[in-house]
Image: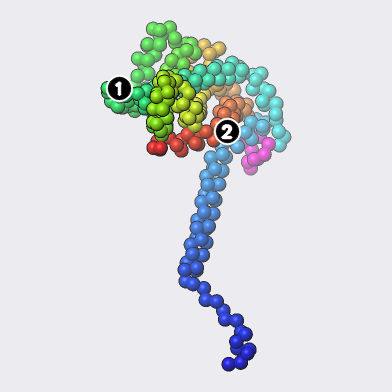
Amino acid sequence: MTATDLSTPVPAIAAPGNHATSARRVRSRGWRLVGYVALVLAAAGLLLPFFWMVVTSLKTNNDVFTIPITWLPDPVVWRNYLDIWQRSDMTTWLRNTLLLAVIVTFLQVLTGSFAAYGFARVRFPGRNLLFLAYVGTIAVPWQSYMIPQFILMSKLHLSNTLWSIVAIQAFGAIGVFLMKQFYETIPEELSEAARVDGLSEFGIYRRIILPLSRPALASLALLTFTTTWNDYLGPLIYLRSPELRTIQLGLNTFISQYNAEYALIMTGSVLSVLPVAVIFLLGQRYFVEGVASTGLKG
C-alpha cells in the first residue's frame, strides 16, 4: 500500500437513522407550512366581509356595485362619516347601547362571580343539585318564556324603559358556569390559609379569588358586552320610544328609511362594529387566557 492510498479520505457513511430524522423534519415543516397557509386563508375569508364593509363605507353610492369590483375606493369619501351623524340619531343610539352594555356587563360580572364563588367554595346541602338546575336553564330557549316575561315587565312598569333590558340580561347562568369552572382551578389551600388568618368568606372572595380571576372575568365581560351590544330582539320588544333605541334598532330604521343609500348603511355598520372590535382587541390577551384555563383542574 502506497502513501497516496493512505492519504485518500474515506467518505463517511451516514447512519440510516439520520436520513429518517431528516425526512421527518422535512415532512413536519411541510405540514406546518400547509397549516399556516390554511390559517391565513381562513383568516382572510373571515376578514373579507369586514374589509368590504369598511371599503364600501368610503365609496360614493354609485360606486358600491360597480363591475368590475373596486377593492379600493377612488375617490375616498370621508364625508359619509359626517352624513351619517347628520341624517340619523346616531349619538342617541350609541349612548343607549353603550349605557346598556356597560351596566349589564358590570352586573353580569358581579352577580356571576359572586354566585360562582358560592357554588365552588361554600359547602351547603343540595349544592350540586341546585347548580345543575341553575345551569340547566341555559337549555331553555328564551322564546319559550318571552311572553310571560314581557307581561311581568309590563306589570312592573319596566316596559319601554332601559331598565327592562337590564333586568332580563343582568343575570345569567353562563357567567356562573364559566366563573365556577375557573374558581375550581384555584388551589383550596389559599382559602384555607386565609380562613386560618381570620379572613371572612367575602374577604377571601374580594382579596384572593377576584385578583386571581382576572382572565376569567375579562372573558365574561367581553362575552357579555358583545352580546348586549349586538342584541336586537330584546330592544325590539321592550324599547318602543325613538329616544330609547339602541344601535341595532336605529340602523334597522335607518335602512328602511334610506334603503338605497348603501354607502351610508355600511358607514353605520362600521360605527356599530368599531367599539366592540376595539374592546376585544384591548382585552384579547385576557380573553384567550381565560378561555384556555377555564375548566382545567389545577
Comparing 184 with 57, the one in front is 184
Determine the residue located farthest toward the front in the rendered image: 197
Q: Position of residue 41 (x, y in %)?
A: 54, 47
- Judge the density around disc 2: few (<14), some (14-19), many (≥20) Cα neighbours within 10 Å: few
As drawn, the label of residue 281 is 2
The N terminus: image quadrant: bottom right
**Amino acid type, residue under disc 2 in the picture:** Leu
Tell me if 130 is positioned left or right of 257 in this view. Answer: left
Can you say whether 85 is above or below 286 in the image? above
Q: Position of residue 220 (x, y in %)?
A: 47, 28
Residue at the image position 37 percent from the left and 15 percent from the top:
149
Determine the residue located farthest toward the right in the rendered image: 75
Tell me if 218 is positioned left or right of 56 in this view. Answer: left
Please indicate, yes or no, whether residue 264 appears anywhere in the rendered image: yes
- Check residue 66 for magenta coloring: yes
Q: Mark 2 or 1 closer to N-term?
A: 1
**Amino acid type, residue under disc 1 in the picture:** Phe
Q: Secondary structure at mark 1?
A: loop
Nearer the observer: mark 2 or 1; the answer is: 1
Q: Determine which quarter of the picture holds residue 94.
A: top right
State which region is magenta.
63-73
Kindly identify which residue carries mark 1. 124
Residue at the image position 67 percent from the left and 22 percent from the top:
83
Q: Determine which quarter of the picture holds residue 279.
A: top right
